[in-house]
Amino acid sequence: MKNIIVRSISGAVYVALIVCAIIFGEIWMFSALCSAFAILGVAELHHLCRSESGAKTALAPLDMAGAFILVAAPSAIMIYASSGGPSVIAVTASALCAYLVYFIARLVCQLYLPAENAIAATSAGLMGQLYVALPLCCASLLYLACGPWIVLTMFIMIWLNDTGAFCVGSLFGRHRLFERISPKKSWEGFFGGLIFSILGGVIIKLTFGAMSPGYSTLQMCALGAVVSIFATWGDLVESLFKRTANVKDSGHIMPGHGGILDRIDSLLLVAPAVVCFVTILIIV
């Protein structure tokens, strides 16, 4: 009972933090939240890699700095461009140079750590940029390019998918979805999450009107399907990493929930998928 209360409070604070950053925050607030997630996520990924391979993580702080640069860059460019300061090209070039400095420093510094497994350590560092920082950069770009409502809708669909998958899977789950990686997940739970996510899109469209992303009902249904499918894959990918590292949780930063990767695992695939979805709608 105590664990349920702690888990509920922790989850409520997490949701409230995201919602407030999206709706009430200025242009930099959601980006700052994504940057914080990136720093914590990269640190946890280093811990998972160390658990699996025994590789030391002396350069973890450098990788966390690289993740911060990558995720914070879009909002920094937007803020400087809108303030009448340097041109967009100049600010973008500066951000790119800053990230290239990280990339070069990351490889050069590895030369001076002979006690480390160079391949394992470098792979862990660069994987953090691709698996954690890049998707969170996509989420920040989505906010800057399309506004807060599409981002809030994306998060609501992720949460509805998780809720539907848990409720339907707990009640009716019989057929395993991916037993090798996650024995508790079922096809029934997957379709429950899919239906919840799609219905959520329809309800948002019909109820909130101007505060919805502005897509048609059919497009909202398609968005719900995209979010549900990639949220499921995102959860399975992180489960694969944890199973490989033989750990239950990626960390312990969130009481009752585990680590930050345990909370944003779905987002790490959903955000890039939604960026592609929105881009396709624009092109078509």
Image (cartoon, helix red, strand yellow):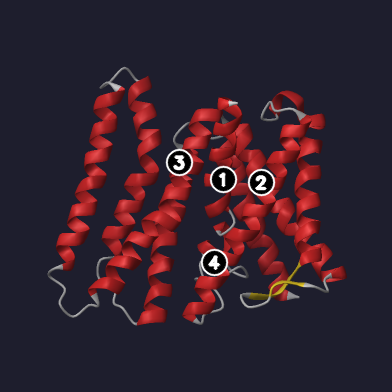
Instruction: Name the residue: 33% across, 57% down.
Output: 64
Label 1 near label 3: C-beta < 8 Å? no
Residue marked by disc 1: 273
Q: CA distance from mark 4 to mark 3?
A: 23 Å
User: How many numbered markers are drawn?
Assistant: 4
Q: Amino acid at mark 4?
A: Glu
Residue type, numbered disc 1: Ala
Looking at the picture, tell me which residue is in the foreground, 210 or 237: 237
Which element carries disc 2, helix, strand or loop?
helix
The furthest residue to the right: 172
Mark 2 nearby-residue class (10 Å; few <14, some 14–19, many ≥20)? many
Q: Are marks 3 and 2 in contact (CB under 8 Å)?
A: no
- Crowd class of label 4 (few under 14; some 14 to 19; many from 20; radius 10 Å): many
Residue of label 4: 238
Q: What amino acid is at disc 2?
A: Val
- How far is disc 2 from disc 4 in space, using C-alphas? 18 Å
Q: Which residue is mark 2?
A: 226
Disc 4 to disc 1, C-alpha distance: 17 Å
Q: Earlier in the sequence, mark 3 or mark 2?
A: 3
Quadrant of the image for the C terminus? top right
Per the model, the C-alpha gap separating discs 2 and 1 is: 7 Å
* Label 3, label 1: how far apart the Cα atoms are: 18 Å
Between tags 3 and 2, which lies in front? Answer: 2
- Judged from this view, the residue extending furthest toward the left is 112
The image's mark for residue 31 is: 3
